[in-house]
Amino acid sequence: AAAAGTQGAEGAEGPAGAADAGATADAPGATAGEAGAPAARPTLGSDDAAVMLASLFKIRPQLRAQLPERLWELRRTHGRYIGDGRPERTLKVGFEPAFVLFVVPPYPDGQVPRIETKGKEAVLIDAPPHRQPRSVADGFVVDEAFNVLGDWFSYVVFRADGKPLEAAPAPEAEAPKKRDGLGLGIRRRSV
C-alpha cells in the first residue's frame, strides 16, 4: 500500500541521452563543434521524466547547474503521490535511487529564492536543491515535510549504478540581511 499513488515507473525509464531543445550534443559529455569548444550540456531526453525536468528548469533555471553532473548519465523514471500526512512514508520505485528530484512543488522543503541588490541592480539567487530523502533497496522514504496531507508531489528518480554520485559544489550561503521592508516598495509599519 506504500506504493499506492506512485505512477510512471512502468516503461518511463530511460537514459537521459535523447535530444532536447537547445542541446547540440548527441550524448552526455559530447563536445560541441571543433576541438577546444565548450562541452554541450547533457540532454534531458524526450520521455515524460524529461518533460517534467524541462518544466522544472524553466521555473528554476539555476538549479540544473547545482545538480551532480553525472546525474544525466543515469537511468530514471518518475512518479507522483498525494501526501497522507504520516511522519514517514516509503515510496517504491523498484530500485535503489541515487538521487530524487522533486518537481512539484518546485521548492518542496520551503527554501525559496532570494533577491540580492547591488545599487540599482537586483539579482535572483535560487535556493539550493532540496535535501535528499532516505534511499532504500526498492525506493525511498519521505518524511512529513515531503508528505503533507493533501499536497500533490511529483518527482523524478535516478537509478543508482553503484558508483558514488558527487554533489555539485554548493554556492556559499550568506546570512540573511535584516530588512525593514517586504520588497516591491512595501514597508512594514506597526499598528
Image (cartoon, rainbow, N blue to C red):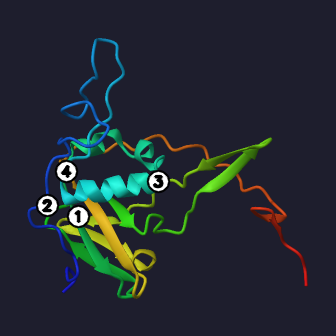
Relative height, residue 148 to residue 96 (above, below): below
Q: Residue furthest top?
A: 35
Specify the quadrant that holds the C terminus: bottom right
Q: How far apart are marks 2 and 1 (CA)?
A: 7 Å
Q: How far apart are marks 1 and 3 (CA)?
A: 18 Å
Q: What element carries label 4?
A: loop
> Residue at the location (30% across, 59% down)?
52
In terms of image quadrants, where is residue 163?
Answer: top left
Q: Which amino acid does label 3 sit on?
A: Arg
Mark 2 neighbour class, 10 Å CA radius: few under 14, some 14 to 19, many 20 or more: some
Q: Residue at x 55, y 63 (%)?
A: 111
The amino acid type, in three-letter code, at marker 1 is His
| Dot 2 amino acid type | Ala
Where on the picture, by quarter, is residue 103?
bottom left
Residue drawn where x is 47% and y is 40% of the image: 169
Return the x and y of residue 27 as percentages of the image width and height.
Answer: 19, 33
Q: Nearer the viewer, mark 1 or mark 3?
A: 3
- The crowd level at tag 1 (other Cα within 10 Å; few <14, some 14-19, many 20+) is many
Front residue of this view, candidates 171 and 51 = 51
Give the distance between the C-alpha atoms of the residues marked 2 and 3, in whole angstroms. Answer: 23 Å
Q: What residue sits right under mark 2 in the picture?
A: 12
Residue 35 lies, with reference to residue 59, above or below; the image says above
Q: Residue 78 carries which label?
A: 1
Q: In 3D space, how far apart are the residues under numbered discs 4 and 2 (Cα atoms)?
A: 10 Å
Callout 2 touching callout 1 (CB < 8 Å): yes
Question: Which residue does the numbered mark 4 point to in the structure image?
Answer: 46
Residue 176 appears in the picture as rendered: yes
